[in-house]
Every structure is written in structure tokens, then in C-alpha cells.
Amino acid sequence: IGNAAADLYVTNPVLNQVAYDSFLEIWATRYDVPPTSSAPAYAYDATQLLLAAIEEVAIVGQNGALVIGRAAVRDQLAATQNVAGLTGSLSCTSHGECAAAGYGVYELDTAVRNNALWPPPLVWQFGQPTEQGDFR
């Protein structure tokens, strides 16, 4: 995005940095470039949750076919609690929300503007005091 990002701040969920760093190493080995956003981390977490739910509920039918009930997968996902993901600790609700809740403010610095780094430096996280001393 070049110099258009100078002095630009963005909000994004705070990622599990240790797990995400490992993910980035694997990504770089496979694709030779860093991801341009955190979207692949969400896709990875969603895939892991879905595959775990399928593995838990899938049964082999009498004819040897693999049977995966949609309602069983949905119910298994809704029961998911405290799964460590790249995007944080994931717990699902009966409404299908499974995202981690922690958000932060990131600064798009020179490295990011030159497509060299994602996520950018975290400058504030929900629950941290601001310069005024309060928690927002």
C-alpha cells in the first residue's frame, strides 16, 4: 500500500503471537511471501475447528460409507470451548460465533508499507491503560 499508509492505524484482533509466528514461518516456506493480512489465520482456525468437529461426530455406516451429520457437526461446534487457535482462545456459541474477542490497535509502519510484515506493531490492546490512565 506504499506511502498511503503513513501514520495509519488499524484495528484487528490480537493474535496468539507464538502460534502465529510459527504459522508465518510455515507460510513463508510454502509461498515465499508473507500474508498481506491476518485472514489466513482465521481460515486456519475455522478449518481446524470444523475438522475437529467432523472427526468427533463422523461415523462409518453399515455399508462402509462415512456419515457426517450436519446437525451433529453444528452441535459439536457449538460445544467447542477454549481451543487454542492462532487468533486466540476460541469458544463457540449456540449462534455459531467462535471468534476470539481480543482486539488491538496496530500501526502500519515502514515495514508494513513495503509489504514486509504482518501483523504490524501492536501499539494498544483492549484492557491496557491509555495515556489518560483509564481503560477503554
Image (spheres, rainbow, N blue to C red):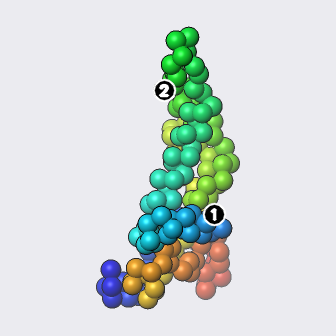
In depth, the one of 101 and 131 nearer the eye is 101
Q: In whole angstroms, how far apart are the C-alphas of marks 2 and 1?
A: 30 Å
Badge number at residue 19: 1
In depth, the one of 105 and 62 nearer the eye is 62
What residue sits right under mark 2 in the picture?
70
- Whether residue 60 is visible, yes or no, is yes
Does residue 119 sit above or below 86 in this rendering? below
Specify the quadrant that holds the N terminus. Answer: bottom left
Q: Position of residue 105 (x, y in %)?
A: 51, 75
User: How many marks do you count on the picture?
Assistant: 2
Residue type pointed to by label 2? Arg
Q: Residue at x 65, y 75 (%)?
A: 128
Q: Quadrant of residue 100?
A: bottom right
Q: Secondary structure at mark 2?
A: helix
Q: Position of residue 84 (x, y in %)?
A: 66, 53
Q: Secondary structure at mark 1?
A: helix
Q: Position of residue 62 (x, y in %)?
A: 56, 11
Does residue 22 sit above or below 98 in this rendering? below
Q: Earlier in the sequence, mark 2 or mark 1?
A: 1
Q: Position of residue 40 (x, y in %)?
A: 46, 59
Q: Residue at x 56, y 46 (%)?
A: 48
Q: Residue at x 39, y 84 (%)?
A: 114
